[in-house]
Amino acid sequence: MKIGELATRTGLSRDTIRFYERQGLIRSEPGQSETNNYRDYPETLVTHLGYLAEAREAGLSVAELRELQEATQGSCAPEDAIKVLQERVADLRRTIETSEQLITFFETSIARLQGADCPNIPG
């Protein structure tokens, strides 16, 4: 299929599709015609681009998407992707724990500062 149809079917812009291709996240093939530079995109990209869009919406960077694809490159085994995703979940859980500790520290500091009798500290 041509990029216009792919864009319509995925809801992504042509520029976004081209960007993902430049980043190595998707591939296309030269079209059949020798008289133009059209590219052909496989049907499987409709689903794959939906996944990429969902991942980006969730906050994954292009570099993280590329890392995920490279970790599972050439493998159709879901176990490979599951392992990479589980590692990402573990990283996020550690980040959440650290963030919660920071929030507690800041809230405690605010409470202490609000109770302090110092003219330079608001509260």
Image (cartoon, rainbow, N blue to C red):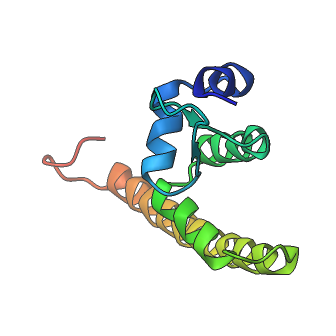
Position in image of residue 91 (x %, y %) = 61, 75
- Say which quadrant the C terminus sits in: top left
Q: Is residue 34 left or right of residue 86?
A: left
Measuring 42% from the left and 49% from the top, which residue is drawn there? 22
Position in image of residue 16 (x %, y %) = 49, 33
Q: Is residue 59 above or below residue 6?
A: below
For residue 74, what is the image quadrant? bottom right
Q: Is residue 101 above or below residue 42?
A: below
Depth check, front residue: 60 or 73: 73
Measuring 65% from the left and 49% from the top, which residue is drawn there? 55
| Most distant residue in the left direction | 120
Q: Is residue 9 above or below residue 39?
A: above
For residue 92, what is the image quadrant? bottom right
Depth check, front residue: 73 or 113: 73
Measuring 58% from the left and 36% from the top, which residue is drawn there? 31
For residue 86, what is the image quadrant? bottom right
- Say which quadrant the N terminus sits in: top right
| Most distant residue in the right direction | 78
